[in-house]
Image: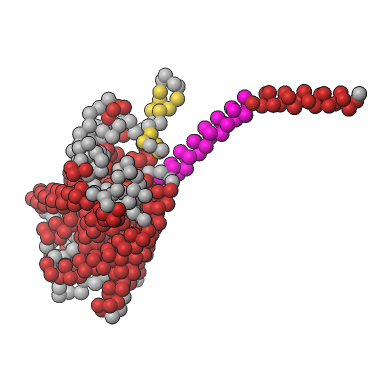
Amino acid sequence: MFNRFHFAIGALFLTGIVLVGIPVQAQDLADVAAKADEAALAGHNAWMLTSCALVLFMTAPGLAMFYGGLVRSKNVLSIMMQCIFLMGLMTVLWALYGYTLSFGGDNAEELGSSFSPYIGNTDYLFMRNVERSWNESTQAPNEPMIGAIPRYTHMLFQGMFFIITPALICGAFAERMKFSAMVVFSILWGTLVYCPLCHWVWGGGILAFGSDYAIMGGALDFAGGTVVHISSGVSALMCAFLLGKRKGFGTADLRPHNLSYTTLGAAMLWVGWFGFNAGSELASDGLTSSAFAVTHFSAAAGLLGWACYEWLTNGKPSVLGAASGAVAGLVCITPAAGFVNPMPALLMGAAAGVICALACGKLKNRFGYDDSLDAFGVHGVGGTLGAVLTGVFATRACWNIAEGEPLGMVEGGSIMPGQLIAIAITWVFSIVATLIILKVVDVAIGLRVDENSEVRGLDLTEHGEEGYIFV
């Protein structure tokens, strides 16, 4: 009787667990799923905030050291000041109106506003519809989102691109442009060149792949081949032509004063570029890993390409060539980072290393322009090459953006006309707009320092300081 009694009690207990556990288990599964979704969103946001920091790291210390080592010692603080000052200046402009001119209208249907394919609207002016706000009906904060990340994070990430792009141009007019002229030029260029281009390519405008407004179907540009590198490189060339050569160009010793800085700066750019390219997926997923991998592979191949080219032609591979080659590889893969596989990335990087070396050597010597730190030779030429090769190697296996249709030429796709049109429009627009801006600044305040200031160095004459004081 004792055993039967316990058996009956046990059976009832187990039955109760089963009957009660069914709804509990379903609720638990729903809670687990909700928590998994929250964790995924938190993971995406964590990666994107890390990418924001990595891209900012590219401007300073990365670019500041890379460029700082390439100038003469009397101008090292000048170029570093330009980089760090732009971190402050462009951030403020981005917060006030840059973000809305670039991306205003991307959420027009939900916000009840209109969309323009040429320039952003005022949806995000002064951070409206970006910042958190209090919702009286739900008694909770509103968190504007874009895809898997908060709108805040998207704004910050894109703002880091807005900072570094005009800083790249500084390499062309290093050691001879007035600091005040650099400030005014950067404001006008960021507003009138960068923001429209950004909207055209990434804001659903006339160059956005698959956009209803796109010319020739638009172009694939994952992380800034047109928006960042072609625009800054071509604009840099215009600056070099209009400002003229540095005093002593071709006769005086204009060699870099500290290649140790340049080498370390290149390594910092390499690290930061993972945020630049892999972060442009705007999430943390399999494609992020692919973009990360091809970025690294292309940089490595670019380094070897430039170094081996010098080894074969000059008998010695230079440290400057290796550092420049890595950057050239990174520039070339930027538009293709989300669209190509690793083996094409190696080919792209190697090609960029050799072709950019030729541009910085033979092309510059042939036409005689003084692109002080080779902003055009690396970014203009490398960015153009990358945009073209994206049309060759892009594959739907990486990003099925065209609903299963082939993309690059290697898989029978037809995106090349759109790539070439986007390149041509970016070149023409950047040339015309930059020349107009430079002429306006020259008339208003003058572009170039006087001869005495150039001889003494911009560190002293523009900032009243010296980079090196030996006592």
Q: Position of residue 4 (x, y in %)?
A: 87, 25
Occupied quadrant, residue 272? bottom left
Q: Which residue lies furthest to the top in this view?
A: 137
- The image shows a total of numbered marks equal to 0
Q: Which residue lies furthest to the front in this view?
A: 412
Q: Is residue 28 visible?
A: yes
Q: Which residue is drawn at 31% across and 73% down?
A: 308
Decide which of 244, 314 is in the foreground and name it. 314
Is 443 drawn above or below residue 457 in the view shown?
above
Q: Where is residue 194 in the image (x, y as percent from the top left)?
A: 22, 46
Is 9 drawn above or below residue 32 in the view shown?
above
Q: Residue at x 21, y 69 (%)?
A: 358
Q: Which residue lies furthest to the bottom in this view?
A: 315
User: Within the magenta stretch, is there residue 32?
Assistant: yes
Taking the image as shown, residue 56 lies to the left or right of residue 447, namely right
Q: Quadrant of the C terminus?
A: bottom left
Q: Is residue 126 visible?
A: no
Q: Position of residue 129 (x, y in %)?
A: 33, 30
User: Within the magenta stretch, is there residue 246?
Assistant: no
Decide which of 140, 366 is in the foreground and name it. 366
Is 219 drawn above or below residue 64 in the view shown?
above
Magenta residues, as a range? Answer: 23-50
Q: Which residue is drawn at 29% across and 77% down?
A: 311
